[in-house]
Amino acid sequence: MIKKLLKENILKYKDFEEKENYTQKRYDYDLNRNELLKSCNYLFNEISKKIVDLNNANSIDINLNINKGNFVKKFLKKIIRKLIWWMLQPIVIQQKWYNELNLHTLGMLLDNQKNIYNLIETLSNQNKNVNDLYIDYRNEVKLYQNSVRDRIENLEESLILMKEKIKNTPQNNVLHNISLIEKKIDDYIESNSLDDIVDYTNFQNKFRGSYEEIKQRLNRYKEYFSKGDLVLDIGCGRGEMLDVLSDIGVKTIGIDKNEITIKQCRDNGFRVYNEDMFIYLKKFDNYLLDGITCIQVIEHISTKKLVDLIRLCKDKLNKDGILILETPNPRVLSTFSINFYVDPTHIRPVHPEFLKYILEENGFEIVKEDYPEYSWVKDGTIPKIEEGIIRNNEEMNQRIDYLNNMLYGSTDYAIISKKI
């Protein structure tokens, strides 16, 4: 598919190159430009000539030659001249005004013609610069085309080699190798428990929060259970969830793998066992439990084990039994910079959409998708733009909300589901 798209784009560039005869167009443009400048220059000269002619004709001479002839003739000519001037004076004045107006108009035309000529010259120079840039652009496009063609050829060769390798690799061997890799990962995780490296109890106290703080956070889950319910808490840790549920009369059982926290829970009067969750769940009769809580556990196990866990929980819960899964939220980038990689036993985050899908595929109905307020990043949020600052104020604030949710939203989430 990628190769096909690349080839189509190359063909588009090729068609463009073949259809454009740029050299001919550039020649035609230069020819038209020269003709236009020549025409403007001719018009400029003609107007200049007309102005000279009109300027020469501007003064009207009505004087009669009265110096020739005898006294009587001179006297008569003088009288005639005065009579004629008396009759023609308004016409002469009007004609002179008209000539001056024409002279002024032609002067304006001449100035405009000069401006047009200068403008054409400026536009011509600018267009020449644009054409030069266009030529540079086309040269760069050609270089890019050649580079893309070379890459496509290399890609085709790589695809051919890859197909040959896949063809010569039996599918069963690939699946077997994947299974071996998954097993090695699980074995490595089991053999490199954080308990063997550091004091996990102190680790939790420092990075997760105090007992009272965690208990306060977990109080929001007690609304899903009633007095007398039997609830299993997987990965009970110090027993905060057991404490919350016991306060409302729920019968609780906890399992964990940390001996220190197990002892702490037992000292507080809770029934807790050092058991593997899969082995312990299989000991229960089906439909026995009213609820199962699993707080900050599923990020420690593989995807296959997560699916197996959900299926086991479905078998052990009675109808309408509640399953609560809480885990870090990969939708928020701060999850990774603040919390997730602090604990080296975390394998991978679980996306809420995938978790909901697995639950629904295995007989659960989603009751609530919970993003607790306590896990929102309080500092560093991007402030909204005040109204009236920019034209698209509302649209920009929507994008700011999206960025704030992605960068500083709830770093934890929980899916509360019910067996159907």
Image (cartoon, grey):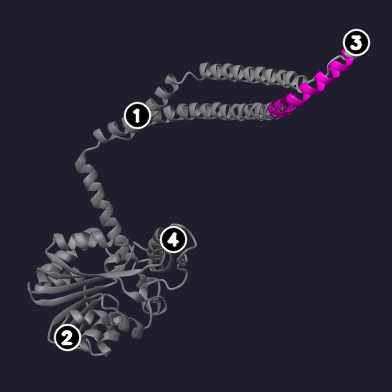
Q: Is residue 412 visible?
A: yes
| Frontmost residue, 161 versus 101 | 101
Residue at the spot of label 1? 8
Instruction: Inspect the image, locate mark 3, and give the three-letter code of the amino acid beneath it.
Output: Lys
Which tag is nearer the camera, tag 3 or tag 1?
Answer: 3
Which of pointers 1 and 2 lies earlier in the amino acid sequence?
1
Instruction: Inspect the image, locate mark 2, and give the three-letter code of the amino acid beneath it.
Output: Val
Label 3 with label 1: CB-CB less than 8 Å: no
Which of pointers 2 and 4 lies earlier in the amino acid sequence?
2
- Could you say where residue 238 lies in the image, as x and y percent from the top left? 30, 82
- Could you say where residue 143 lies in the image, as x and y percent from the top left? 50, 28
Within-10-Å neighbours for mark 4: few <14, some 14–19, many 20+: some
Residue extending farthest front: 72
- Reply yes or no: does residue 97 show up in magenta: yes
Label 1 with label 2: CB-CB less than 8 Å: no
How many angstroms separate mark 3 from mark 1 (CA)? Answer: 99 Å
Within-10-Å neighbours for mark 1: few <14, some 14–19, many 20+: few
Which of pointers 2 and 3 lies earlier in the amino acid sequence?
3
Instruction: Inspect the image, locate mark 4, and give the three-letter code of the amino acid beneath it.
Output: Asn
Residue at the spot of label 4? 393
Residue at the spot of label 2? 250
- What's the mark number on residue 68? 3
Is most of the magenta stretch helix, strand or loop? helix
- What's the mark number on residue 272? none
Q: In which quarter of the view is residue 184 placed?
A: bottom left
